[in-house]
Amino acid sequence: MPVKLSMVYELCTIQLKIGLDFRSKERIDFAGNTLIKLLSKFENELPLFDPIKDMEIDSVEVKIACSEIERLQKLMNAKPKPN
């Protein structure tokens, strides 16, 4: 299903194949029940996609950039936000 990139917040490592035909109530119910089972299996904490680990990126430059991003995010979160 196509979505706008701005609507994507996080990606999960799990791929759920439920079909594309949602014209019948049964198919909608099946998709909903499948999703509920999946969420309960992972206790509502689906494993998030980590591009560095999951794609086995072993570049020193990428690791340095990720460390710098993490450092800056911690710094930003530590400062009080203006009203």
Image (tube, helix red, strand yellow):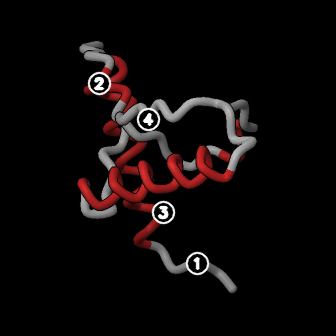
Residue type, label 4:
Leu
Q: Disc 4 or disc 1, which is closer to the eye? A: 4
Mark 3 to mark 2 CA distance (whole Å) = 27 Å
Q: Quick one: SS at disc 3? A: helix
Q: Disc 2 or disc 1, which is closer to the eye? A: 2
Residue type, label 3:
Met
Q: Which residue is mark 3?
A: 76
Q: Are marks 4 and 1 in contact (CB under 8 Å)?
A: no
Q: Quadrant of the C terminus?
A: bottom right
Q: Which residue is mark 2?
A: 54
Q: Is residue 30 left or right of residue 71?
A: right
Disc with the residue nearer the chain's start (2 vs 1): 2
Q: Which residue is mark 1?
A: 81
Disc with the residue nearer the chain's start (2 vs 4): 4
**In the depicted view, which residue is nearer to us: 18 or 16?**
18
Whole-percent x, y for residue 60 in the image:
27, 16
Mark 1 to mark 3 CA distance (whole Å) = 9 Å
Residue type, label 2:
Asp
